[in-house]
Amino acid sequence: MEENNSAKHPDQPWRILEFYSGIGGMRYSLTRAGVNANIVEAFDINDKANDVYEFNFGHRPHQGNIQNLTATDLDRYGAHAWLLSPPCQPYTRQGLQKQSNDPRAFSFLNILELIRDTSQPPTMIFVENVVGFETSDTHSKMIEILVKADFVTQEFILTPLQFGVPYSRPRYFCLAKRKPLSFQSPHFDNQLLHSPSPLFGRGELDQTQESLDKLIQSCKPIESFLEFKNPSQQISSSMESTNTVDDFEAPEIDDKGDDHDISSLEQYFVPLNLIERWGSAMDIVYPDSQRCCCFTKSYYRYVKGTGSLLATVLPEKKGKTSPLKKQCLRYFTPREVANLHSFPEDFHFPQHISLRQRYALLGNGLSIAVVSPLLQYLFAESS
């Protein structure tokens, strides 16, 4: 492999390839990190995700099977770094856990194997996936490929709760640099860390549960991420469907072709029959809560295990000891889910993306509050 793309002039932007680009979370993270970067191409097979990406960035990702890319294709871009957020289904607890035998893992392994065949291999690689990936055979193969290609790695499992966001979404991250590049804290090389300390220049790790509990207590309340800031406002607004709740464009036509106004708050309230049937399995949070559960791509389609619900009427005693029917539970709106993923205010969905599609695309997204400092650390020059 040649070294001709590893030398970069200090004033030259990093040339980036963004694989599995989704709705642009990685690109927003780069911007927030202040990295001088140029996305030379993005890749995603999902046409709806590409619609959203194009709507926000003015560039449509390459839409096709990443597995079909060749070393020659990648060499044309002359990229310094590859950022990857491959499908998580092969490694989730709910899935079949076929790992590298899952067809959805094939494209990721193909990209990694192309490193040795490219004449201009990347000097940095960033991978994001679900917790569980780190114990998979895909992970083992990834590390083996990276070591053979002369990369040094630092791995993390981090959650937005560690960055002041009241959102429990732990994710696995792999940061890799090809020698002679090195990390600012090289004594953490080839380790899996559960603390963000290296990202902030701290040499000592505090990975205790007590430390995480303190971080949760310092998180902003959920109210800071809501479109309506107090329960009484939410309830009065729910009676007036003309009030605008979501600035992601409305009205729209939903999947069934019915008129569907995303600006109507009423549609976000959980029907009583669902509360009666699934109330015991629901995760209920309040405006002053400092933690909510991870939103999955099935949020709004199902209420069990897909994300937290917000109580808009505060009971005398919080929790399920008080009747849930009287707490007026509602789903978080897509804008609120985007807020908890730390997407910027100027992020929007195009009008034709249905409500369920918005939730599904956000559920497949990443936390910008977590990824941004990781990218800042990855692209930082070693001292």
Image (tube, helix red, strand yellow):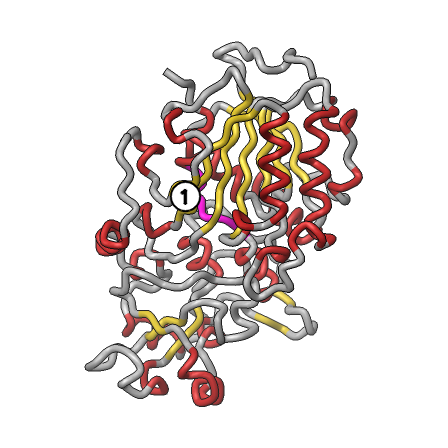
Q: Residue at x 49, y 53 (%)?
A: 131
As drawn, is 180 to the left or to the right of 195? right
Residue 187 drawn at (x, y percent): 37, 27
Q: Residue at x 56, y 73 (%)?
A: 301
How packed mark 1 is, by other alpha carbons closer than 10 Å (few <14, some 14-19, many 20 or more), is many
Residue 225 drawn at (x, y percent): 35, 57
As drawn, is 260 to the left or to the right of 371? right
Q: Nearer the viewer, residue 196 or 258?
A: 196
Placement of 68 over or under 168, stated as above or below: above
Placement of 362 over or under 175, stated as above or below: below
Placement of 93 over or under 37, stated as above or below: below
Is residue 366 located in the magenta-colored stretch of the structure?
Answer: yes
Q: How many marks?
A: 1
- Identify the secondary structure beneath mark 1: helix
Q: Amino acid at mark 1?
A: Val
Residue 298 drawn at (x, y percent): 56, 67
Magenta part of the chain: 365-372
Q: Quadrant of the C terminus?
A: top left
